[in-house]
Amino acid sequence: MKSLYIRAVRALGALVRATGVLASLERRAPRSRAATWLASLFAIHDVDGLQRLDVPWWTFASADLVAGWLRDHPGARVFEWGSGASTLWLAARAGSVHSVEHHAGWAGVLAPRLPANVDLRVVEAVATSTPAVPSAKPGHAGLDFAAYVAAIDDVAGDFDVVVIDGRAREACLARAVERLAPGGIIVFDNVDRQRYVDAIETVGDRLTLTMTRGLTPALPYPTRTALLHSTARSAAR
């Protein structure tokens, strides 16, 4: 059903672009949230389309909050599980972005588009009958994401922003909390699944939760993105 929807939207998008309507929406997008969202509907799984609109694939509300935080923290260090439109969006606003991707094919598509301040690594899951860090996503049984989750340990220092938007997100969250700089933010996307809500509750005593729900680029329905703020005081910059 998902692939059918994507094919249908792309076919419609070609028609809308041919009529000039899509170009008109893209010109209006910097000044209109409605135009940005409408144009983004035709950019589902299209990193170039989302880059033109300058949006990450999170709720608009969460992107606004993170953008404001990054404006107040120039040179921020970012770590990201799961690369894509958010990688490009963050690179334009942060000092450095370290991104880890489990899908080599997707990383190959994204890599030529990345600026110099992004370090993209591919860490694929390992096939095994006894995964130490499994993923509950359908179709991922028998895959171990332990090395993927642990990739954050290969980069020294704390991170001002950590984005969790890939596989094995519960395990990524536990690791992220330990590497978050004082005053930093964890962006946990697509938190509608109960297992993600449960994982967030386990770290609630150390982080302040801001739950955003609403319109999201490229999607015709509302979703939720959680922002988890460190309660420790950040050092002066």
Image (cartoon, helix red, strand yellow):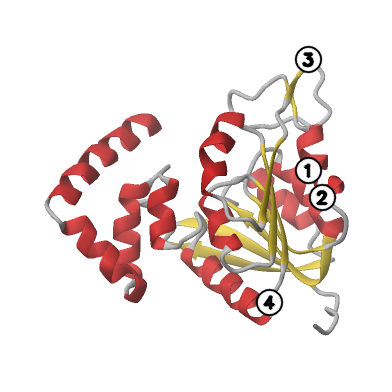
CB within 8 Å, label 2 to label 4: no
Location of residue 141 in the rendering, given as x and y in whole percent from the top left corner:
67, 21
Label 1 crowd (10 A; few <14 / some 14-19 / many >=20)? some
Q: Which mark is residue 54?
A: none
Q: Nearer the viewer, residue 89 or 214?
A: 89
Q: For marks 1 and 2, give the CA distance.
A: 5 Å
The residue labelled by disc 3 is 129
Image vertical order of residue 56 relative to residue 236, above or below: above
Dot placed on the residue nearer the N-terminal end, 2 or 3: 3
Q: For marks 2 and 3, give the CA distance.
A: 23 Å
Q: For marks 2 and 4, give the CA distance.
A: 26 Å
CB within 8 Å, label 1 to label 2: yes
Q: Secondary structure at mark 3?
A: loop
Tell which tag, 1 or 4, sits nearer the viewer: 4
Label 2 crowd (10 A; few <14 / some 14-19 / many >=20)? some
Image vertical order of residue 130 relative to residue 195, above or below: above
Please name the amino acid that badge 3 sits on: Ser
Label 3 crowd (10 A; few <14 / some 14-19 / many >=20)? few
CB within 8 Å, label 1 to label 3: no
Tell which tag, 3 or 4, sits nearer the viewer: 4
Please name the amino acid that badge 4 sits on: Pro
The residue at 39%/45% (across/down) is: 44
The residue labelled by disc 4 is 74
Dot placed on the residue nearer the N-terminal end, 1 or 4: 4
The residue labelled by disc 2 is 174
Please name the amino acid that badge 2 sits on: Ala
Q: Secondary structure at mark 1?
A: helix
Q: Secondary structure at mark 4?
A: loop
